[in-house]
Amino acid sequence: MKRLVFVLLALLLSATAFAQRGGRQQLPPPKEAVAPAIPGVVAAGTKIELVKFPVQNPEGPIGLTDGSGIIFTERGSADRITKIDANGNTSTFVEKGNLTNGMGWDSRGRLISVQRPRGAERVGVLYPPESVATLVDSFEGKPFNALNDLVVTTKDGVYFTDSEGVYFLPPGGPASAVKRVISDIENPNGVQLSPDEKTLYANDKDGEYLLAFDVKPDGTLTNRRNFGKYKSVTVPGHKDPLLAEDNGADGLAVDSAGRVYVATNLGVEVFGPRGEYLGAIPIGIWGGEQNMLSKPANLTFSGPDKKTLYTVGSGAVYRVQLLAQGLPGRRK
């Protein structure tokens, strides 16, 4: 059984690499999946629609502020921010993406992102053009390493992650005000806030649990706890780091009822407001006898009623209509 899992994941990663790098072999689009019933979240049999395939190493999706679609980063040779409207039409939103990963809107309509040019990683304003700026590019005199995700608070504070932990840049604060607020997660990834912004969630790609922390008035965090246990497939102890990353916990989203949505190797795992496991939405299935799952990297709510969940990953963009609704006032 373990050998079969190794083989399936190796094939999936190989297919993903071709799709993300725009390889010479053009893979057929993955087959669309359907959702199981998750009460209050999604109706049984709801189609997970393949919107775009292939795209280059997609990440960091975020809904447009008017609900008309999403933008996401293509981190391959294109290095751009791409827009998809409600009809599935694509266009370039920002021509130079600075190898952006996670993104978020602030209250001024600026697009804040974690940017990963080699030797110059930073958190900064990527759009509009007249507002482009670096907000912070180091901590305690050392450059960031492998910046990954961020979430912007309603007051414009920014939580963001790199391989060393989770950081907080206070609203309007100078770069020198940045604080490392979590340093004991071995492999931090996605971050998200609860609807009332009193709880911060962080994914631990090497752990068994989605983690939660209480947010203090100054933005620092306390009361670390295991929030929800991932159900995604694991391949422990494998020498290939891509196979050993194992749970695949990456991007996060929350809905208006406080449920938490996690992009993992299973698809989108959904947890209730108290961490109870509610179910998983499979995203896509690669063809062939293996019927391998298509792994999402990140996700976001959009649409005029914020009931459309978009995911990106494995070289594709998907969307699914939910019963649940994203936060009307949340920009991510």
Image (cartoon, rainbow, N blue to C red):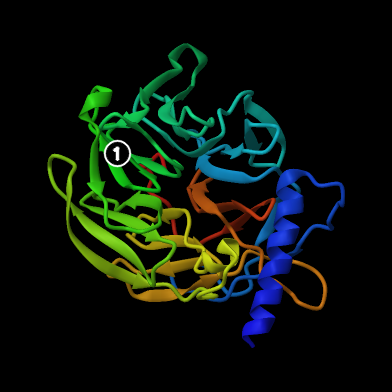
Residue 141, position as x, y percentages in the image: 29, 29
From where the camera sits, is residue 217 visible? yes
Horizontal relation, residue 24 to residue 129: left or right? right
Q: Is residue 214 above or below residue 57?
A: below
Residue at image location 80% in from the left, 57% down from the top: 29
From where the camera sits, is residue 32 visible? no
State the SS at label 1.
loop
Residue at image location 14% in from the left, 47% down from the top: 216
Q: Residue extending furthest bottom?
A: 1
Q: Is residue 97 above or below residue 150?
A: above
Residue 169, position as x, y percentages in the image: 27, 33
Rendered image quadrant of residue 309: bottom right
- Pick the quarter of the image with the N terminus: bottom right
Q: Residue extending furthest left?
A: 217
Horizontal relation, residue 250 to residue 204: left or right? right
Q: 175 and 230: which one is in front?
A: 175
Badge 1, how many Cα within 10 Å: few under 14, some, many 20+? many
Q: Residue extending furthest front?
A: 239
Residue 187, position as x, y percentages in the image: 40, 57
Q: Is residue 313 above or below residue 332?
A: below
* Mark 1 residue type: Thr
Q: Is residue 264 above or below residue 114?
A: below
Q: Which residue is mark 1?
A: 153
Residue at image location 53% in from the left, 76% down from the top: 37
